[in-house]
Image (tube, rainbow, N blue to C red):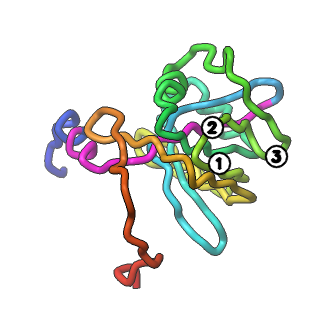
């Protein structure tokens, strides 16, 4: 048996790593799905793969496992209200939202910083979450919109001003 880890302290330590905030969306039949995630990551450039996770306790998990496509909507810094709305379980998250639904692309939320249209690639056990890997089929990015950031249990803002240009991938990856 490994060491006992205090869950609250562990969560607080994880909060030291800032993340972007996204809403992943899909449509199953006539039902729109949407959930706030902060677990979004790039996985591979060739093929273009991303990953995210959904809590196994989510009421919609079985529907997510059936999704034939989904959209990762990277929220803009002024969309904390959408993040909060889509983080609440078992509510009408879509009421009053003018969104665009495209066959094979999921549901596109207006005003986002970026959106990635994905087809399912794989799903894997991730403890109390299920990991979804998606193949990016298309994407849009709006460089004039700053992303919403979450850190230390609250929304945060990126520092304004100039950014140093960095060549990616960094040499540390090789």
Q: Which residue is at 71% across, 36% downward?
A: 26
Closest to the observer, 29 or 72: 72
Query: CA–CA distance between discs 2 and 1?
Result: 10 Å
Give me the disc on residue 76.
none
Q: Which residues are magenta?
A: 12-28
Residue 76 is one of the magenta-drawn residues: no
Q: Earlier in the sequence, mark 2 or mark 3?
A: 3
Residue occupied by mark 2: 111
Give me the disc on residue 115.
1
Q: Which residue is at 67% across, 35% downward?
A: 110
Are there few (<14), some (14-19), or many (20+) residues within 10 Å of tag 1?
Answer: many
Is 41 situated left or right of 63 in this image?
left
Closest to the observer, 99 or 89: 99
User: What element does badge 2 sit on?
Assistant: loop
Res. 27 image quadrant: top right
Is 142 situated left or right of 163 in this image?
right
Of the two numbered discs 2 and 3 in the rendering, the one whose residue sits closer to the viewer: 2
Give me the disc on residue 104.
3
Relative to 21, does residue 27 appear above or below in the rendering?
above
Percent of width and height locating residue 164: 37, 70
Of the two numbered discs 1 and 3 in the rendering, the one whose residue sits closer to the viewer: 1
Q: Which residue is at 42% across, 73% downward?
A: 165
Query: CA–CA distance between discs 1 and 3?
Result: 14 Å
User: What element does badge 1 sit on?
Assistant: strand
Closest to the observer, 164 or 135: 164
Residue 26 is one of the magenta-drawn residues: yes
User: What element does badge 3 sit on?
Assistant: loop
Relative to 142, does residue 73 appear above or below in the rendering?
above
């Amino acid at each position: 048996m490994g060491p006992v880890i205090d869950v609250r302290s562990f969560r607080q330590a994880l909060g030291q790593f800032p993340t972007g905030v996204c809403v992943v969306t899909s449509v199953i039949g006539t039902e729109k799905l949407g959930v706030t995630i902060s677990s979004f990551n790039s996985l591979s450039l060739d093929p273009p793969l991303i990953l995210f996770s959904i809590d196994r306790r989510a009421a919609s998990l079985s529907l997510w496992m059936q999704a034939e496509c989904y959209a990762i909507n990277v929220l803009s810094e002024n969309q904390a209200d959408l993040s909060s709305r889509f983080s609440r379980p078992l509510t009408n998250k879509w009421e009053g939202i003018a969104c665009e639904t495209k066959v094979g692309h999921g549901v596109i939320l207006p005003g986002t910083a970026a959106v990635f249209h994905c087809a399912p690639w794989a799903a894997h056990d991730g403890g109390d979450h299920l990991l979804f890997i998606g193949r990016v089929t298309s994407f849009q990015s709006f460089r004039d919109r700053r992303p919403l950031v979450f850190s230390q249990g609250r929304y945060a803002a990126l520092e304004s001003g100039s950014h140093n240009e960095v060549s990616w991938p960094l040499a540390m990856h090789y």
